[in-house]
Image (cartoon, coloured by chain):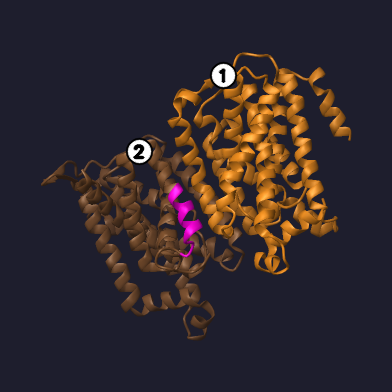
């Protein structure tokens, strides 16, 4: 509550850099939370999730530059486009069992990047797209914050619902879930669609904020890696885990690692290895066990 | 034109098959999905590059050295990290090897920078009728075929090879038969790394070397396994050839950029239509 009020008031007192930084932090909270929806709850690791971010970014950029849409509906349309993409990919791929789904998602990034380059006329190809200049940082800040809050809220609603329980059953033992009559495919698909909406919207917002996008900037593997690290670190499958992970790692990134790009990714890789081996349920998971916190944290 | 494409397809097919075989072994024996397979290949390529630039020795002669180096590295990785997730849900091994792959790629970036390197050893092509055969690709084909054949012979006829196959079929029964499963895992991972390294060596003469070169190989190796059938080792051969052919045929009709998407579409199609692979294998 307090944090929410503080965040709402910040742009009035904060510096331009501060607003930008918090904006980015909200973005990561939304991204991490979304990744958690599919990978944390169902156990279906999505290695290509940045694809939805990029899809949202390009959709918004094209709508804003070519069709003259205002950025907010454009960003929402980005979310819709990402969901459509998720439907297209998820429909065939979610019928597969976990590991094969992950493999399929691995290649996704590369394919999308190739396709974006191919459809040069529409997307500006390798030279990218520039959005008309607009001083909208503060408005984007609020929308980004709202998106982050929405994703967290959705996660909470799902985790406390029957739907969420079924998703987690799928994660624990898919065969048993099917034996109990759960339509695993449908459930996975819904979770997947939900998990794509966030990145789609956020991608559109980021495009507006940065004013310029090109394939490499919106489909980088490091975005997926960062999403994964944040959720793993904080605690996958929990509501606040991704938020915690996003905040901690984002702050660490800003303070220390952004200056050393390759060390930064290397560290992320090392953290992933360490978390998987030592702390598979993340920080929140450890706290949950130690202090008997409720499952719906 | 078509002949050229078919020949090119077969030439690359053997390479795909060899690298995929390593991945198939890891998956079959340990049920681990090694996302770090591509980076291992990349390290093999760099090893070849450095050996070549330091000693000037024919890279094909340093191949055994490179393979030995990566064999050891593979065993090290297995003993320190991988063995802990062999019994865990597949999700853990997936994430773990993913983390390892990121770490390896970035260590390479830090140590070697992303400047493109090349091993300029064998250039030019032979002309056989209407077909131009790139020399380095032909040699790669020969070596890859030999190594793959050797691997199969090893698996089929030697005691260790049979032990590996036994463990792949059923770990518990293998243990009951007195096989030291931990040792088998160690050797299998090392062997797979060595095969990937061989791929890296052969490829280093053909394409530019940079830290991210392995990523696409990871994906294509999985595709090969899916095509041939998980756990079906000869299937990897067929899968490799098929991938090579289809890729080259696609490049006839599509632009280079789109033909990258072909591999992906192929994967999705196969997984949808025949998930057990063309030759039948474990249902995943």
Range of residues picked out in magenta: B265-276
Principal secondary structure, stretch drawn in magenta? helix
Residue assigned mark 2: B254
Image location (x, y in percent) of residue A221 = 53, 40
Q: Quadrant of residue A276?
A: bottom right
Image location (x, y in percent) of residue A109 = 51, 41
Residue furthest bottom as drawn: B177
Identify by letter the chain in orange: A
Say if mark 1 contacts mark 2, CB within 8 Å.
no
User: Can you say which quadrant of the picture contains the N terminus of chain A?
Assistant: top right
Mark 1 Cα shell of 10 Å, populated few (<14), some (14-19), many (≥20)? few
Identified at 35% across, 41% down, the residue is B209
Residue B275 part of the magenta-drawn span: yes
Q: Quadrant of residue A31?
A: top right
Tell me the element at label 2.
loop
Q: Nearer the viewer, residue B131 or B64?
A: B131
Disc 1 and disc 2: Cα gap in Å? 28 Å
Tell me the element at label 1.
helix
Residue assigned mark 1: A66
- Mark 1, chain letter? A
- Mark 2, chain letter? B
Image location (x, y in percent) of residue B24 = 43, 63
Query: Do we see residue A36 in this rendering?
Result: yes
Identify by letter the chain in brown: B
Mark 2 Cα shell of 10 Å, populated few (<14), some (14-19), many (≥20)? some
Q: Nearer the viewer, residue B52 or B201?
A: B201
Residue furthest front as drawn: B273
């Amino acid at each position: 509550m307090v944090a929410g009020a503080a965040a709402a008031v910040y742009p009035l007192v904060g510096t331009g850099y501060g607003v930008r930084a918090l904006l980015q932090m909200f973005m990561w909270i939304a991204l991490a939370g979304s990744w958690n929806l599919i990978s944390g709850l169902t156990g279906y690791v999505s290695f290509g999730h940045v694809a939805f971010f990029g899809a949202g970014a390009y959709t918004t950029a094209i709508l804003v530059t070519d069709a003259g849409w205002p950025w907010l509906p454009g960003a929402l349309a980005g979310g819709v486009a990402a969901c459509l993409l998720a439907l297209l990919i998820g429909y065939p791929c979610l019928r597969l069992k976990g590991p094969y789904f992950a493999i399929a998602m691995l290649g996704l990034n590369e394919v999308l990047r190739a396709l974006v380059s191919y459809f040069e006329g529409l997307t500006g190809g390798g030279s990218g797209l520039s959005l008309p200049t607009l001083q909208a940082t503060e408005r984007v800040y609020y929308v980004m914050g709202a998106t982050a809050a929405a994703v967290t809220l959705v996660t909470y609603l799902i985790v406390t619902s029957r739907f969420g329980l079924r998703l987690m059953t799928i994660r624990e033992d898919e065969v048993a879930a099917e034996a109990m009559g759960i339509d695993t495919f449908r459930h996975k698909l819904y979770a997947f669609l939900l998990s794509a909406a966030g990145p789609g919207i956020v991608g559109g917002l980021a495009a507006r904020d940065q004013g310029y996008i090109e394939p490499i900037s919106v489909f980088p593997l490091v975005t997926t890696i960062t999403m994964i690290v944040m959720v793993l670190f904080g605690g996958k499958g929990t509501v606040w885990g991704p938020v915690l992970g996003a905040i901690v790692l984002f702050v660490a990134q800003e303070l220390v690692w952004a200056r050393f790009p390759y060390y930064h990714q290397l560290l992320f890789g090392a953290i992933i290895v360490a978390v998987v081996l030592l702390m598979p349920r993340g920080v929140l998971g450890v706290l949950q066990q130690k202090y008997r916190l409720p499952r719906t944290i | 034109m078509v002949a050229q494409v078919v020949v090119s397809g077969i030439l690359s097919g053997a390479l795909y098959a060899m690298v995929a075989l390593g991945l198939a072994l890891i998956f079959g024996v340990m049920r681990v999905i090694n996302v770090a397979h591509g980076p291992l290949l990349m390290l093999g390529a760099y090893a070849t590059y450095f050996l070549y630039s330091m000693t000037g020795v024919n890279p094909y002669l340093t191949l055994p050295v490179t393979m030995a180096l990566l064999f050891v590295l593979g065993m090290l990785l297995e003993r320190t990290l991988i063995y802990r997730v062999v019994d865990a849900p597949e999700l853990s091994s997936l994430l773990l090897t993913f983390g390892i792959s990121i770490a390896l790629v970035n260590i390479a970036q830090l140590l070697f920078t992303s400047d493109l390197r090349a091993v300029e050893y064998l250039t030019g092509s032979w002309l056989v009728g209407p077909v131009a055969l790139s020399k380095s690709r032909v040699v790669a084909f020969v070596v890859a075929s030999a190594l793959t054949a050797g691997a199969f012979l090893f698996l089929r006829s030697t005691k260790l090879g049979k032990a590996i196959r036994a463990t792949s079929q059923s770990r518990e029964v293998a243990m009951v038969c007195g096989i030291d499963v931990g040792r088998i895992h160690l050797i299998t991972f090392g062997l797979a790394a060595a095969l990937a390294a061989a791929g890296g060596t052969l490829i280093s003469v053909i394409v530019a070397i940079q830290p991210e070169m392995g990523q696409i190989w990871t994906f294509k190796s999985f595709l090969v396994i899916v095509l041939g059938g998980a756990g079906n080792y000869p299937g990897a051969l067929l899968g490799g050839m098929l991938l090579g052919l289809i890729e080259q045929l696609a490049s006839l009709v599509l632009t280079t950029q789109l033909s990258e998407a072909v591999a992906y579409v192929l994967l999705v199609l196969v997984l949808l239509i025949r998930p057990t692979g063309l030759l039948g294998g474990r249902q995943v």
